[in-house]
Amino acid sequence: MNPAHLGVIGLGLVGRALATRALEAGMTVAGFDVSASSAASARTSGVAIAADLGALLQATRIVLICVFNDDQFTDVVTRLAAQTDGGASLSLVINAATCSPAAVEAAAATMRMRSIAFIELPLSGSSAQIHAGEALGLVGAEDDTLRRHEALLRVLSPLHVHVGPPGSAARAKLASNLILGLNRAALAEGIALAEGLGLDGHRFLELLRLSPAYSRAVDTVGDRMVSRDFTPRSKLAQHRKDLALILEQAALQDLVLPLTQAHAGLLDRAIAMGLGDADNAAVIAALTTKSGTRHPAS
């Protein structure tokens, strides 16, 4: 494999969106994913697919991690550390996965012990928004690391905010995801009521855009909720994973989050209906579909 500017671990919706941004900026990109279908989709975009992590590290010195959860992230970090101890050359690790602050801080410490720079870059937005450069990147990094790698961050996420050292962005992402998810759930509930009262859903959205009840969820998922278009731009099960992290962090602070607990129950119902791999717009189905009905993910 020819040397690549960037190696991407995890080629799902977010990984492919970020890889595509790098490719469109003129970078060469290599990637690895345990899912053959995800790897195949990335290959069609121009990503060179590595056989394993060892091969990926031979092809690049900069790794971008885009996995699902803490367990996968920690496993990748452990493997990267072992490969580096074995002689692989790695200069920068960027984590775009939404993880617990503790997992991010532990990863940063592991990389620091090996003189490898570490940046966390969870993104707030769908894969379509990430590809378009419209998602907000939350940056957790030491100041000098940020200065050295600002140009690459601008490629991956033109709109980004430096929150603080590693772990800070994870905290900000969880708090902002709480609000984002509740905005979607509230919109879905309002649409369900409006439709139940005989109003046209799309005309109701136009009304919301002029009202104090407006939120950006009206524009990002409103039409797809009304049309019941659940083609995934982000996955409902992934947000349910984030809610678990949010509730865990709240418990550590002795906080009770009743609205988030109710939201988690609503997503559990959607997942039981077969909508875990559907878009987050599918939350409306959990409100408007009879219990026991199953939907194939769009």
Image (spheres, rainbow, N blue to C red):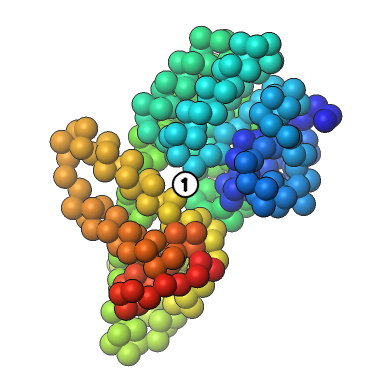
Location of the C terminus (image quadrant): bottom right
Q: Horizontal and vertical percent for residue 286?
A: 34, 70
Q: Assign a secondary structure to mark 1.
A: strand
In the image: residue 224, left or right of residue 157: left
Kindly give the residue lying farthest to the front in the view shown.
292
Residue at image location 27% in from the left, 36% down from the top:
249
Badge 1 crowding class, 10 Å Cα cut-off, few under 14, some 14 to 19, many 20 or more, is many
**Number of marks in the image?**
1
* Res. 10 image quadrant: top right
Q: Horizontal and vertical percent for residue 43?
A: 76, 47
Q: Horizontal and vertical percent for residue 191?
A: 34, 76
Location of the N terminus (image quadrant): top right
Residue at image location 32% in from the left, 78% down from the top:
290
**Residue 288, above or below 259:** below
Residue at image location 53% in from the left, 32% down from the top:
95
Closest to the observer, 26 or 254 = 254
Q: Horizontal and vertical percent for residue 19?
A: 67, 42
Kindly give the residue lying farthest to the right in the view shown.
2
In the image: residue 238, left or right of residue 53: left
The amino acid type of the residue labelled 1 equals: Ser
User: Which residue position is annotated with label 1?
Assistant: 124
In the image: residue 102, left or right of residue 159: left
Does the image show residue 195?
yes
**Residue 184, above or below 71:** below
